[in-house]
Image (spheres, rainbow, N blue to C red):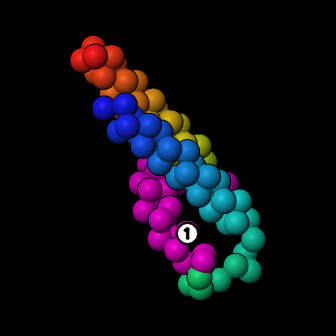
Amino acid sequence: MELIAQSIATFIEIYTVLLIVRILLSWFPNIDWSSNPWSILSQLTDPYLGIFRSIIPPLGGIDLSPILAFIALQLVGGLVTSGLSGLSGSMG
């Protein structure tokens, strides 16, 4: 169980970095999102960000949905890893 918790925590850390890179690169309008490596980054992150863009649409050109996306990712990651860690502690 500890391996699963650590794997989830590592995945969330890597995915968080990918989200940060994606959001920072969105400030540069000349990036061609259809060419590699940008298309891969877009394919990995846009579906997740799209969930939150449907909840909070961009307000006057400012997109606040990534903030909610980060909060949700950290919350779920914390719950899953602490829950799995608690299970492995009670089993051993």
Q: Amino acid at mark 1?
A: Leu
- Report x, y in % for residue 62: 67, 54
Task: Give the extent of the magenta segment.
Answer: 37-62
Specify the quadrant that holds the C terminus.
Answer: top left
Name the one closer to the observer, 83 or 23: 83
Specify whether residue 43 is painted magenta: yes
Name the element at disc 1.
helix
Q: Where is 37 relative to 66, above or below?
A: below
The residue at the point 65 percent across, 83 percent down is 32
The residue at the point 67 percent across, 66 percent down is 26
Q: Which residue in the structure is indicated by mark 1?
A: 41
Location of residue 83 by image quarter: top left
7 sits left or right of 39 in the view: left
Q: Where is 39 relative to 85, above or below?
A: below
23 sits left or right of 52 in the view: right
Q: Where is 20 relative to 31, above or below?
A: above
**Is any part of residue 79 visible from this angle?**
no
Most distant residue in the front direction: 92
Specify whether residue 67 is painted magenta: no
Using a 10 Å C-alpha cutoff, classify the residue at mark 1 as few (fewer than 14 neighbours), some (14 to 19) or many (20 or more): some
